[in-house]
Image (cartoon, rainbow, N blue to C red):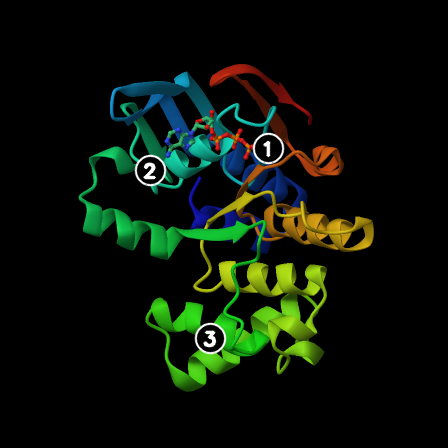
Amino acid sequence: MTATQIDLLQSAGSASQANLSIRLERTEVNAIAARGVEMVYQSGTERFQALKNIDLEVKSGDIQLLMGPSGSGKTTLLSILAGILTPTSGSVSLLGEEISKLSSSKLAKFRLENIGFIFQGFNLFPALTALENVEVALNLKGIRRAAAHRQALDLLDQVGLSQQAKRHPQDLSGGQKQRVAIARALAGNPRLIMADEPTAALDSHNGHAVIELLRNLAKEKGRTVLIVTHDPRIIDVADSVAYLEDGVLKSGVRTR
Ligand SMILES: Nc1ncnc2c1ncn2[C@@H]1O[C@H](COP(=O)(O)OP(=O)(O)OP(=O)(O)O)[C@@H](O)[C@H]1O
């Protein structure tokens, strides 16, 4: 079903049917698909296999968690799925594009246009205000001056931080910093959000606020959200949880 067909259904007053169609459309498409992914780290004569034959499919609009003990390979897998790290073997498709086949410049462009990243340590520029931190991300995506300023204000508003736009990171709480980082990850409207331990540095209140934002991104805005986490609170909002152990995908549990 095309977007036009969905519009027609909605305008014909078949809202519930259209909603069902949208849901079906979302669940039909895999936003992320990994096949036979292996990763071997080699330093000198030392060889370490961090991932073994990983198959993973993430449906469009889903919140997918990657969980497992420390050292089980979660960040390695996230980096491969984000096209930051090249697997030793196997293939990865994002939004129907097999990224393993892209040249490094095409891959960099694909990442910039389609993936927003959120990290445990926020990775904000300390010398820039919250607003400027988001503007810089928009500038990188080719959006300049007045448009970048307007969009950055709008993104800060979406994460509930309009009042803090002029503050520097050192004057924000951990939760507020992470919300700036989420606003920055949303610059340019990427369809995929990838987060590495987004709540690890946050207390319960701020952790919940960030989890609610991530839920909203998937459920209200249709983004696909992939999260590496040890935080059991996030399981409540996840559609699917994949557990890694010693580089092996032990189980994938669909939670809804
Ligand atoms: N660049 C590297 N060179 C060699 N070994 C590496 C490298 N990066 C990671 N590893 C090893 O690969 C394994 C998986 O690491 P990874 O960081 O993916 O695990 P993780 O599950 O994300 O761990 P944590 O929860 O502690 O962040 C670990 O044993 C780690 O030491």
Say which residue label 2 marks: 85
Q: Amino acid at mark 1?
A: Leu
Asked whether residue 30 is in view, the answer is: no
Q: Amino acid at mark 2?
A: Leu
Q: Nearer the viewer's eye, disc 1 or disc 2?
A: 2
Q: Nearer the viewer, residue 219 or 120?
A: 120
Say which residue label 3 marks: 135
Q: Amino acid at mark 3?
A: Glu
Q: Secondary structure at mark 1?
A: strand
Sequence-wise first label, 3 or 2:
2
Quarter of the image holding residue 97? top left
Q: Residue 65, which numbered label?
A: 1
x, y percentage for residue 242?
57, 23
x, y percentage for residue 140?
35, 68
The local crowd at label 1, few if under 14, some if 14 to 19, many if 20 or more residues have their Cα within 10 Å, is many
x, y percentage for residue 93?
34, 33
